[in-house]
Amino acid sequence: MGGSSLFERLEPDALRYRPGSADEQAHQRVEAIKRHLEQVLNSRQGCSQSSPELGLRDFNGVTQASSDLVVAISADIRRSVEAFEPRIKVTGVRYQPDPDLPLELNFRLDCQVQVNHKEEQVQIEVAMHGRDGYTRVK
């Protein structure tokens, strides 16, 4: 299976998938998934005419309590990942607050990824930055 997303294959300067050892292939696959998730999670719902449900909802101006907002964002992350990243299965999304970065919302996704013909458990970190509005996937 290829390790690159459609967008990566269309981009001329993008890193190219290179076959290697089983561990290298697994690492390349997970890194490709993370790059794709970063694109999906930085999209805003309703901004794509061909796929209006792509991306996260705009939570600016939401009047929910902070705990309700975290639950809503967690559910939206899960929905987006399940809908637009078929290479993984999300088994859990957990909010992980960082007292040193109060303007950042951090989530951990517990996922199953098909790697080398077997299911592997993978944890993906998602950090939503309040000051620049960019979501980073680690």
Image (cartoon, helix red, strand yellow):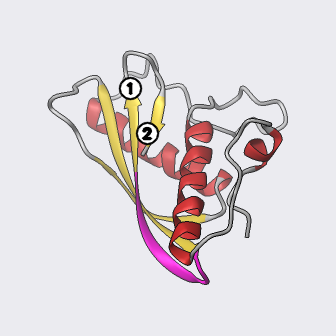
Q: Residues within 10 Å of mark 1 (few under 14, many from 20)?
A: some
Which SS does the magenta portion mostly show?
Answer: strand
Q: Is residue 75 above or below residue 110?
A: above
**In which image quadrant can residue 54 be found?**
top right
Instruction: Give the residue displayed 73% in from the left and 64% down from the top.
Output: 2
Q: At numbered mark 1, what does the secondary structure look like: helix, strand or loop?
A: strand
9 in magenta: no
**In which image quadrant can residue 39 be found?**
top right
29 or 39: which is nearer to us?
29
Q: Is residue 41 above or below residue 1?
A: above
Q: Name which residue type carries label 1.
A: His
Instruction: Give the residue displayed 70% in from the left and 40% down from the top.
Output: 14
Q: Is residue 6 left or right of residue 45?
A: right
| Residue corresponding to mark 2 | 73
Q: Which mark is residue 129?
A: 1
Q: Nearer the viewer, mark 2 or mark 1?
A: 1
User: Magenta segment range?
Assistant: 115-124
128 or 115: which is nearer to us?
115
89 or 2: which is nearer to us?
2
Q: Is residue 27 above or below residue 54?
A: below
